[in-house]
Image (spheres, rainbow, N blue to C red):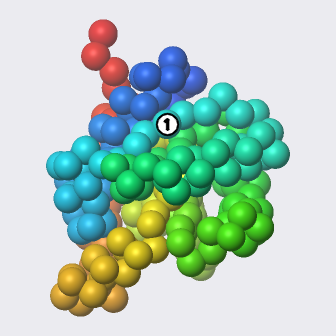
């Protein structure tokens, strides 16, 4: 079921472990299951993805948490990538989108530019030049707002080893359009269902 603005409903706030479970299910079912990111499966299978949620309620506090997660990645090579879930802040996509500039600036300030990059996912994600109802937006729609911290060296190596990596976005758009908004919205909604 979607709101009148065309966006899918955002799940209600849950306990942290349940929020993480919802996002893990989304990664398993949509990101890995639909092969939206062919580089994710290996880290998913090897359990090298850190899922963490924060109670941050301001962009400033979220930047502090982001900086702490960058420091953790610096010192823990057993974690390949971090999914930082922030369900209580930047729930409006315009605010979230504007925050991404501050997040990238943090990479520069902390001398992490070129070491990490931040991929963006949000329940109301909308690419420039698309309509809110366009299925292709679901490549970056997640149950909650989140920041995905990626190691640049690992990503570069994965791209080199993957044939036609430049075709991934176009392939994903074609898949989303083939599946259609209704099916994708139902799949995303199913990820939010918790076992009673």
Q: Compared to 36, does 82 lie above or below? A: above
Quarter holding the C terminus? top left
Residue 63 as seen in the image, left or right of residue 28: right
Instruction: Quickly name the residue at label 1.
Output: 52
Element carrying mark 1 = strand
Q: Residue at x 44, y 22 (%)?
A: 17
Q: Compared to 192, does 31 lie above or below? A: below
Quarter holding the N terminus? top left
Q: Residue at x 49, y 51 (%)?
A: 75
Residue 40 as seen in the image, left or right of residue 102: left
Residue 39 as seen in the image, left or right of residue 65: left
Question: Residue 72: x percent and y percent?
Answer: 53, 47
Q: Residue at x 27, y 67 (%)?
A: 39
Question: Residue 46: x percent and y percent?
Answer: 20, 49
Q: Is residue 86 visible?
A: yes
Question: Residue 186: x percent and y percent?
Answer: 32, 42
Q: Compared to 112, does 196 lie above or below? A: above
Identify the image quadrant of residue 91. top right
């Amino acid at each position: 079921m979607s709101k009148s603005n065309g966006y899918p409903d955002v799940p209600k706030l849950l306990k942290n472990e349940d929020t993480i479970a919802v996002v893990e299910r989304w990664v398993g079912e949509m990101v890995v299951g639909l092969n939206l990111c062919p580089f994710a499966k290996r880290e998913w299978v090897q359990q090298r993805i850190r899922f963490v949620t924060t109670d941050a309620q301001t962009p400033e506090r979220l930047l502090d948490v982001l900086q702490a997660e960058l420091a953790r990645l610096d010192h823990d090579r057993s974690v390949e990538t971090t999914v930082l879930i922030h369900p209580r802040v930047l729930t409006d996509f315009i605010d979230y989108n504007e925050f991404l500039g501050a997040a990238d600036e943090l990479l520069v300030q902390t001398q992490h530019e070129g070491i990490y990059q931040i991929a963006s996912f949000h329940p109301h994600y909308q690419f420039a030049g698309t309509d809110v109802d366009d299925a292709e937006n679901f490549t970056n729609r997640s149950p909650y707002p989140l920041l995905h911290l990626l190691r640049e060296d690992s990503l570069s190596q994965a791209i080199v080893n993957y044939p036609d990596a430049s075709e991934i976005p176009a392939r994903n758009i074609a898949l989303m359009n083939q599946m259609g908004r209704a099916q994708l919205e139902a799949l995303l909604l199913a990820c939010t269902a918790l076992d009673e």
